[in-house]
Amino acid sequence: MSTRMNPTPKLIRRATAALATAGLAFAGLLAASAPAEAATYGKAGTVVKQCTGIKKQSWTLPGTKATLQYWYSTKNGGTSCAMVYDNVSGKNTMYVSLRPKTGQGSFDYGLYEYYAGGAQLTNTKGKCVYVYADISKTRYSKVLGFKSATICNK
């Protein structure tokens, strides 16, 4: 003959409270790890929140209101930085990259409200860098506009 154990109401309350606490803790971890405003699809190299130094060049991405900005500072053997601003309300998929003639580059790619970047490289004094930016409505939609340029730093 088997005996069946019936849990007491006190045990049920304790188990329910423990599960609820664990669930809240897990939900908090998920919320803390997800960005509030952006969906980043990819980053590489050094990506900073804001470029510093002197804004050397600014271009409009043809067919859009977006602008690509190139900044340069003499710090760290010459620091180059690029950002793309969409200049329209709402989120858009933006990509900005900066790379030297040879070696590792830097890029930022994602769904952003205001800007992507800054993609940054150091030790660029006396070197040329390639800068590129594009913008589209969604991740896999047609590119609305793009701009590329080569900048040589003195």
Image (spheres, rainbow, N blue to C red):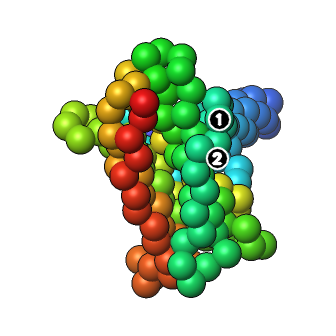
The residue type indicated by label 2 comes to: Pro
Residue drawn at the location 57% of the way across and 63% of the way down: 59
Quadrant of the image for the C terminus? top left
Check contact, mark 1 vs mark 2: CB within 8 A: no
Would you say 130 lies left or right of 64 here?
left
Q: Nearer the viewer, residue 41 or 56?
A: 56
Would you say 102 lies left or right of 113 here?
left
Label 2: element kind: loop
Q: CA distance from mark 1 to mark 2?
A: 30 Å
Residue 87 vs 43, above or below: the answer is below
Q: Residue furthest front?
A: 154
> Can the viewer see residue 122?
no
Where residue 85 appears, as percent x and y from the top left, is 65, 59
Q: Nearer the viewer, residue 93 or 135?
A: 135
Where residue 150 appears, as percent x and y from the top left, is 36, 52
Quadrant of the image for the N terminus? top left
> Can the viewer see residue 55?
yes
Residue that mark 1 sits on: 54
The residue type indicated by label 1 comes to: Ile
Picture quadrant where residue 19 is located: top right
Picture quadrant where residue 28 is located: top right
Would you say 51 lies left or right of 13 here?
left
Q: Residue 35 bears which disc, if any?
A: 2
Where residue 93 appears, as percent x and y from the top left, is 54, 67
Residue 38 vs 117, above or below: the answer is below
Label 1: element kind: strand
Where residue 129 appears, as percent x and y from the top left, is 35, 42
Q: Residue furthest top?
A: 76
Residue drawn at the location 42% of the way across and 35% of the way down: 153
Question: How crowded is the residue under tag 2: few (<14 C-alpha within 10 Å), some, or many (20+)?
Answer: few
Q: Residue 125 bears which disc, if any?
A: none
